[in-house]
Image (cartoon, rainbow, N blue to C red):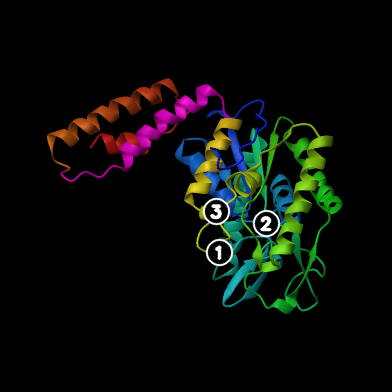
């Protein structure tokens, strides 16, 4: 008996390999996938501006990276004893303007060089609701969009739901600039399965519908775009609150692993998947903490995995096993 509705997922062509560079931009679900890619030794740079949810902020993030925008004191504001950027996550905030500017500009410079040579850009859109600035907002242009509200007063913002045409327009502008900056890059779009219930259940569904419509319209008109159905896998395939965390908003560990497995199956070839299995075996050994580290059995265990890791490193010299080799060589 079948207890959930699986569906066919379009294969990514060409598939992702370890030699490729991947940049990930978007919602918190992006970081879940990014963490798994890093563990399997893929070259990944994720969220150079921090987590962003709406299409306007995603597009601005990528465009600013392409243009290598360098921030100054005039781009910041102060609130709650800290200095912040409206286009960046709070992890870039600092006690002084200089500290904040340094973190932002260092991240942008790194991302600019990385994106120029990246093979894939994975974009995860979270919400089509945008928060624009009112006249009460500090150091913000009236009507522009905040990527992060930094717990500012609600009176500083006015919210509205973008329509599919507006989403297509902002993402289309970003894609045009991206194509000129890095002609060979391929873009993978996903919609985050995280529920944005701050807007309410009905408005969350309206928002996801806008994003899905806009992304599929873009894919139908532009080359080098691919859609991976993370949202549909959680909402329509798993389709059960057992696969959500206690907040009933975020997919739990089991759901994230399920989506990851589907991503690997759809976006990587058999050779890459086999290499990932060997890397996962080394990861498991690297995380192992023995009851008696001085035992002969553990020494043999370390020696065995040092040889396995060294052999894999020699076979695939583009992988970095420096930390693991040092650990196994104790």
- Report if the CB atoms under discs 1 and 3 are less than 8 Å apart: no
Majority secondary structure in the magenta region: helix
Identify the disc placed on residue 99: 1
Image: magenta residue range: 267-292
Q: Nearer the viewer, mark 1 or mark 3?
A: 3
Decide: is 100 above or below 17: below
Q: CA distance from mark 1 to mark 2?
A: 25 Å
Q: Nearer the viewer, residue 54 or 263?
A: 263
For this view, does 217 lie left or right of residue 254? Answer: right
Of the numbered discs 1 and 2, the one sitting upstream in the chain is 2
Q: Nearer the viewer, mark 2 or mark 3?
A: 3
Q: Residue furthest left?
A: 295
For this view, does 206 lie left or right of residue 97? Answer: right
Viewport quadrant of the C terminus: top left
Residue 321 seen in the figure: no
Q: Is residue 289 magenta?
A: yes
Q: Is residue 270 magenta?
A: yes
Q: Which residue is mark 2?
A: 53
Residue 221 seen in the figure: yes
Q: How many marks?
A: 3
Q: CA distance from mark 2 to mark 3?
A: 16 Å
Q: Nearer the viewer, mark 1 or mark 2?
A: 2
Q: CA distance from mark 1 to mark 3?
A: 34 Å
Decide: is 262 above or below 61: above
- Residue 91 picture quarter: bottom right
Q: Which element carries disc 3, helix, strand or loop? A: loop
Q: Which residue is mark 3?
A: 251
Q: Which element carries disc 1, helix, strand or loop? A: helix
């Amino acid at each position: 008996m079948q207890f959930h509705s699986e569906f066919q997922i379009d294969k990514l062509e060409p598939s992702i390999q370890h030699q490729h560079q991947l940049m990930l931009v978007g919602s918190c679900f992006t970081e879940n996938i990014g963490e798994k890619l890093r563990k399997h030794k893929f070259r990944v740079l994720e969220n150079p501006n921090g987590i962003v949810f709406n299409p306007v902020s995603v597009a601005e993030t990528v465009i600013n990276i392409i243009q290598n925008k360098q921030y100054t004191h005039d781009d910041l504001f102060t609130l709650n004893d800290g200095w912040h950027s409206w286009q960046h996550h709070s992890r870039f905030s600092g006690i002084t303007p200089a500290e904040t500017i340094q973190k932002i500009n260092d991240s942008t410079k790194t991302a600019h060089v990385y994106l120029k040579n990246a093979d894939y850009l994975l974009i995860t859109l979270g919400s089509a609701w945008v928060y624009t600035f009112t006249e009460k907002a500090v150091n913000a242009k009236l009507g522009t969009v905040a990527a992060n509200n930094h717990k500012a007063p609600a009176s500083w913002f006015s919210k509205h739901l973008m329509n599919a045409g507006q989403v297509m327009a902002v993402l289309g502008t970003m894609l045009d600039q991206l194509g000129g900056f890095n002609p060979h890059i391929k873009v993978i779009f996903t919609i985050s399965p995280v529920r944005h219930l701050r807007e309410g259940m009905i408005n969350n569904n309206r928002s996801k519908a806008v994003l899905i419509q806009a992304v599929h319209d873009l894919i139908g008109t532009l080359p080098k775009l691919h859609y991976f159905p993370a949202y549909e896998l959680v909402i329509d395939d798993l389709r059960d609150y057992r696969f959500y965390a206690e907040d009933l908003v975020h997919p739990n560990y089991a759901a994230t692993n399920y989506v990851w497995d589907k991503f690997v199956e759809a976006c990587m070839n058999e050779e890459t998947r086999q290499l990932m299995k060997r890397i996962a075996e080394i990861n498991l050994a690297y995380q192992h903490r023995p009851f008696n580290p001085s035992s002969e059995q553990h020494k043999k265990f370390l020696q065995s995995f040092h040889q396995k890791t060294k052999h894999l490193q020699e076979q695939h010299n583009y992988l970095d096993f420096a930390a693991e080799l040092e650990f196994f060589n104790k």
